[in-house]
Image: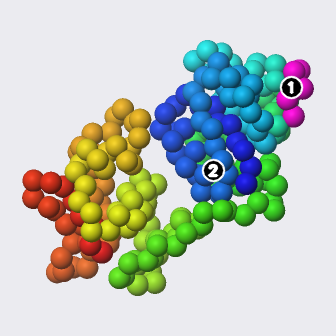
Amino acid sequence: MSRILLVEDDESLLFEVRRAIEHEGHQVVGVETIGEARQALDADGFDLIVLDWGLPDGSGVEFCTELRQAGENASILMLTGRSLPAEKVQGLDSGADDYLTKPFHLKELTLRVRSLVGRSQRPLQRQVIETKDLVLDEGKRLVTKKGTPIELTIKEFALLEFFMRNRDRVYSLDELLNHIWVAEEEAAPDTVRTHIKNLRKKLDNPGEESVIQNVHGFGYRFIG
Ligand code: CA
């Protein structure tokens, strides 16, 4: 397990990147500003810093240069929306070890993280959850229904994982929103409804009771 500091001011990206890196078995501290990053680095050592270029209180590249001048020896992975070659050179000149241009696939990110923190790392919390027809493999981020892989979006996966871990319990829309869409301002109860609808489409057997039951007046219960 490595300790990773993630500095990213886009809340939903912070959430998803944190989740992806935690799934690799690492410990992640997530912050949204350079100021918070400084505090975290003062308090603790990190093996890797994943650093966004554009932050509310300054430039990630300048911060990276500053860290190197101060003798910081953690690996640094820069995240940025800018992909011009000259800027790429500037990014690496600042002392970053690697560079990832947004938008990127989380898979690409986890591969870079793996190569920066060492290939010997093994996920700690790889876990497989099984119900009647479904198998969810957290480590592989794979869901199968009677052996057939089901393609899910990141949020559908997160929602299903939550349901499978808390089978037979009833959750209101607000509770689901708070568990799965943490700190995402655009998410609303309708977002949850849409994801439940999509999960049902992907998971239910035609003509049979849905794996996600409506509990009238209360919310939803997973019975799959
Ligand atoms: Ca940013």
x, y percentage for residue 115? 79, 53
Q: Nearer the viewer, residue 201 or 131?
A: 131
Q: Is 224 left or right of 54, judged from the image as shown? A: left
The disc labelled 2 sits on which kind of residue? Ile
x, y percentage for residue 12? 47, 38
Q: Identify which residue is drawn at 90% across, 26% down.
A: 71
Q: Nearer the viewer, residue 39 or 212?
A: 39
x, y percentage for residue 46? 76, 38
Q: Main secondary structure of the magenta part?
A: loop
Q: Check the image and name the residue furthest to the top.
A: 57
Q: Identify which residue is drawn at 33% across, 39% down.
A: 187
x, y percentage for residue 43? 72, 28
Establish if 125 lies above or below 51.
Answer: below
Q: Which residue is mark 2?
A: 21
Q: CA distance from mark 1 to mark 2?
A: 24 Å
Q: Which residue is mark 1?
A: 68
Q: Identify which residue is drawn at 18% across, 76% down.
A: 209
Instruction: Specify how the rendered protein is coloured.
Output: rainbow
The disc labelled 1 sits on which kind of residue? Arg
- SS of the residue at dot 1? helix
| Image quadrant in which the N terminus is located | bottom right
Q: Is residue 84 visible?
A: no
Q: Nearer the viewer, residue 38 or 185?
A: 38
Circle 1 crowding by C-alpha within 10 Å: few under 14, some 14–19, many from 20 = some
Magenta span of residues: 68-73
Circle 2 crowding by C-alpha within 10 Å: few under 14, some 14–19, many from 20 = many
